[in-house]
Image (cartoon, rainbow, N blue to C red):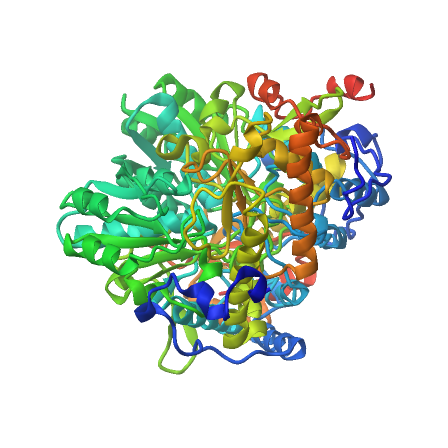
Amino acid sequence: MLRAVGARSIDELFAPIPEQFRLKRELNIPPQMSEAEIVEWFRARAAETGHGYAMFLGAGAYNHYRPVVIDALISRGEFFTAYTPYQPEIAQGTLQSIFEFQTMICELTGMEVANASMYDGSTASAEALMMAIRLTGRGSALVARSVHPEYREVIRTYARYQGLPVKEVGFGDNGRVDLAALKKALTPETACLLIQSPNFFGTIEDVAELAEIVHKNGSLLVVSIAEALSLGVVKPPVEADIVAMEAQSFGIPLGFGGPYAGVIGTKERFVRQIPGRLVGETRDKNGKRGFVLTLSTREQHIRREKATSNICTNQALIALMANIFMSIYGRQGIKELAKQNLAKAAYARQQFAKHGKILFEGAPRFNEFVMRTKEDPYVISHRLADKRIIAGFPLIKFYPELGNAAVWCCTELNTRAQIDLASGEVR
Amino acid sequence: MRDDKITKATTHISQNEGLIFEKSSPGKKAYRLAPLDVPEVDEQQLLGKAARQDLGNLPEVSEVEVIRHFTRMSTWNYAVDHGMYPLGSCTMKYNPRVNEFVARLDGLANAHPYQPEKASQGALRILKALSEQLIEITGMDAITLQPAAGAHGELTGILLMRACLESRGDARKKILIPDSAHGTNPATAAMVGYQVENLSSNQQGQVELSALEAQMNQDVAGLMLTNPNTLGVFDQQIGRIAEIVHAKGGLLYMDGANMNALVGKTRPGDFGVDVMHLNLHKTFSTPHGGGGPGSGPVACKKFMEPFLPVPVVIERADGTLGFEYNRPQAIGRVRMFYGNFGMLVRALAYIMANGPDGLRQTTEDAVLNANYIRKRLESTYDLPYKTPSMHEVVFSDKLQQQYGVKTGDIAKRLIDYGFHPYTVSFPLVVHGALMIEPTESESKEELDSFIDAMKAIAEECEKEPATVLNAPHNTRLSRLDEVTAARKPVLRWKPQQAKTAAE
């Protein structure tokens, strides 16, 4: 091949790199390893990472069962070794699956349109907030303090250099957004209020009431959903203008935090301001139904610096996992699964209440609850880890006013025995 | 229409399949839950008016229907596993299966991001090992693995530049971006509050030094440069470029989309780059998944390290690893948790499988393959820039246009020949561009087969342009009506569509 290209040596092809910048040694990284050695190395790392523990952590990442069908299907090379479906004639598999995903997200959230996915729930929330700013032409935003602290950090990073003040609104004794504080904080410049429901404490917000207050001010309501499975039993936020959801609960492995899949849903009239890819239905020359990427004039590759976002790659394969999960459980299963979560957490709350104080009792919740203990939650967490139990998430770093409180989560995978054991260890 | 030159592909029976909603009927199910071992609850009573009544049109199907549905749909996709996928700038290389295997090991796949550090040591060890190796590969000093994709990495990198310049007292107003850049570059600069100033390239497709000197002033935060650029050209003046930017107090950002041309042969940190992102889904073999997930680590020089997103991985006095959050100068967070960990695992496995010599040879093969295509096709297709190519080559459709055929048509005909098309109409600096990146994964046989297809199509353009203009002919669907899709968007299925679908 070198002869065919007319080069005497491979280095001749690298002549454009100036001599002084060429690397004249091998990279200082470990030598080639065989497949057996690689597997062995990662097995050792996996063994150093706790698994098979009783999991009571939620806080933005939820331990749900993943039907084996999901990995069987997404392991098909036709799905996972394909690129963004720029050539629709040979990408109908990806395109149709995204169209189905968009539809399911609409059905679940009560929104009229949904995009093909975003990186995750935190960036989807930040992008939803920017979208509200564009839609209203207003210059500031409100975010509830009961939104996941790391989501709020991402929002701050995104908003920081857009000259957009983002103010926070506190929570009341029932864990919900403090309505009096909200009314005081709204100004004619408020583009939106962003809340999470169920919020970081597991409390379900009164979305209809918040929407009424916010809409009266001419602002938009953005609802972030971190625990997608809650939608199996919780009324969808139909009063919201934009929904930013994390789909991890739908068959996506915890995976030490990623990859997950975010998604943005909204009303039809707002679709031209939605960021990210959209798949639409169309026909081919013979009138057969097919799907294509559409409305791309919003996007960076056409609009460059005037685009709705810089997002290019999304989370197509992860959205496919969620699509398969929703197909497996479907209309009945998602509800039954959600009901099991509700029951497990309700039982756990009763058991844990014997050993500490449950906070925010005055409002409904899904599969998480907050408990205050005498002992420092970090000490509890450390002790329980030795008993192969992963304890709740300590809140002191983000909510010092709550003292020794932690948010605990129970899913369908927590057995009664685990709950009895863990609650007995807490004091 | 003659198809006798099509050797790589033959049409075969492909299953039809409607939308999953159209297969649904009440009562079918693909799951069984464990019996509830705690008391049942009444959700109406627990949730009150927050209780949901029904789940609308979610499907109800059996397990075998789920399997067939997605299997059938998968067969409609073209993928790297089928053959060459020469999408320029996308680096569609082979995705090794061992990567997939190790990413799914118990422990790595099931770890909760907030589980205690003492139960996360293996995962932390992976983050540390990958960080160290990417730092060595790029010649930089520090790194964050948090960004979820390339454009997200760009955002992180430009935020770092801004924070760094602000700490010196002036964030400045503008970012210079060459006209050949990917669209994410200007979109990113705008998200960080910078004005975008276009920088023209010269006749060699490289940065015009005099233009850079004229435009680089105290208002300019820096230059966002893709190197090699989207023409596949390595900017030979890179040393001078860095000097000009630095002399005016600016910073040099490198878009690492084309790092597959450089690994093991040169290091951006050695040629003056201050901050850059990598696309693990391009250079480091993590799968593209039909459009994601990606992963876009950002590496930088020592002086920018204090601004990296929180948390960073540190080694504690007792030798254990942990996360450090207390970093007052940090730009904050760009994503929750620690990034697309599953992709980081795969990228590390790729580096381990290759080692230093393997990574170098990968780069050499990628560049050799691109040059082989260039040499064999340069008499058939117009080559607008004669500057040496690195890992990709950009032709134009100038010669075929005289028969009324454009790059998009040639691409569609390539589908009939059993290949995924190259990148169409990009970069914008080439009118009617055909941007071809073979990667190291292709054998000489596959390359020859691709070249034969391209030559056969060029001949068709001349002799029977209608064949090319109406391509593809052998796919499930012919060309799709994208105009109507955008004019009257149908973005979701609705029950009433079920009737028309049966047509």
Quadrant of the drawing holding the N terminus of chain A? bottom right
- Is residue B351 among the parts visible in the rendering? yes
- Is residue A424 among the parts visible in the rendering? no
Residue B19 x/y as whole percent? 75, 31
| Quadrant of the rendered image containing residue B473 | top right
Q: Nearer the viewer, residue A239 or B133?
A: B133
Q: Nearer the viewer, residue A175 or A233?
A: A233
* Residue located farthest toward the bottom when viewing the structure as drawn: B318
Vertical relation: B299 (above or below) B432: below
Residue B198 x/y as whole percent? 29, 37
- Residue sitting at x 71%, y 43%: A324
Q: Is residue A298 left or right of residue A233?
A: left
Residue A249 x/y as whole percent? 61, 47
Q: Nearer the viewer, residue B468 or A305?
A: B468
Q: Is residue B118 left or right of residue B225?
A: right
- Residue sitting at x 78%, y 21%: B501
Q: How many marks?
A: 0
| Quadrant of the rendered image containing residue B485 | top right
Residue B360 x/y as whole percent? 50, 71
Q: Is residue B120 left or right of residue A290?
A: left
Q: Is residue A218 left or right of residue A222?
A: left
